[in-house]
Image (tube, helix red, strand yellow):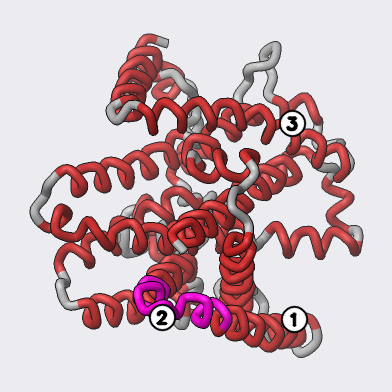
Amino acid sequence: MKNTRLTFVDLMRGLAMIVMIEVHVVNSMMNPALRNETWFNYINFLNGMVAPSFIFISGFSFMLASRSKLDEFRTFRYAFWKQIGRIMLIWFLGYMLHIPFFSAYKCINVATADQWMNFLGVDVLQCIAFGLFLVFILRLSIKNDKVFLLMVLVLGLATVIPAVKIYTIDFQKYLPLPMAMYLTPIYYTNFPLFPWFGFMAAGNLAAWFFSKLLDAGSAPLFMKRLFISGFMFAVICIPLMFYLKDYAFLIKDVRPDFLFFTGRLGIVFMILSSCYYYCSWRDKLSPIILYPSRESLAVYFLHLQLIHREFWWGKSIIAMSHQSLSFGACIIISSGVVLLMLPMAWIWNYYKTKYGYFGRIAVAVMFSLGSTFFMLR
């Protein structure tokens, strides 16, 4: 059971990472005309499950990992600072992915207002970092588990149920722009807290109930019920949402819609349960899944650098593609990117696991060198 508890989380996160690479390649390199093909609607829907799965499993794994560390968290020992450091690193990398230029001079003198808007936009990493920070603060300050769970539930519902109404509010009138971008999808924000924090909250709650039933020896029953619940959510909410959108014309924007959220959450439940049952009879995961999962933050950051930065004769891979590729060509490139990320993830995981201080020293060195390079360019 210990193996199952660890590996099914790795499996779900690893699958999300691999498909996320495909999503970024397709969105950046595929011929836009292919998006009008009927078959692409199904691909697009499946690709749209990546971010909910990634945010959900981030909340789920945080709750599992924090069970044995609460005393250290609340007494501000090493585990507390390590968790804070990881959250801040996620936040930092989220913004660094959209920095206009890796040069202080160009950022000050060349970057346009539009590029700075892109920099301030809230992407999936910022959404995860904010969600983890919020839940972490609640976990520190609320010692009663039932009160903590109630707060997470209330906050989750508060970001999902009113999301349609929230999207009509112009928060720029009331808040500084960087804060307003966390609430609604304005400018370059793709993952505002409304309703995306709901997936984080759902992951927290699911992990808490799973861990309790795991201790009681009833984890398989919990996963069975989770799968059935997810199936019911998906088959009821998603067809109803499409009917109300495409035939009744009652839904104009599906992004904040409660039915859309609930249907996707149901699919996430089914994915989690399926990963659990798969890992209950398989001893090991493929390295292609395992290492990108365990080093998901590094893989996420580096694969975007690989395809977006102008490393290749003054051009990025995206610029070289001219957005003219077929879907099949995008799959081949995605597979190549995954294979390039695999040795990096394996090496990083090996040394970080073997030498306790390797990760911290390596991150500090890279941060120092990167900062120096940034300031001098």
Label 1: which secondary element: helix
Please report whichever mark, 2 or 3, sits nearer to the chain's N-terminal start: 2
Marks 3/1: CA distance? 35 Å
Residue at horizontal 39%, vertical 33%? 353
Residue at horizontal 43%, vertical 65%? 200
Farthest left residue in view: 75
Amino acid at circle 1: Phe
Amino acid at circle 2: Leu
Q: Quadrant of residue 215?
A: bottom left
Q: Is residue 300 visible?
A: yes
Residue 3 is situated, as x and y percent measured from the top left of the image, at: 48, 56
Question: Which one is nearer the viewer's eye here, 143 or 245?
Answer: 143
Residue 6 is situated, as x and y percent measured from the top left of the image, at: 46, 55
Residue at horizontal 52%, vertical 54%? 7
Describe residue 263's horizontal placement relative to residue 215 as left or right. Answer: right
Instruction: Decide: few, some or many residues near mark 1? Use Cα within 10 Å; few <14, some 14-19, many ≥20.
Output: some
**Which residue matches tag 2?**
157
Q: Is residue 248 above or below residue 288?
A: below
Marks 2/1: CA distance? 22 Å
Label 3: which secondary element: helix
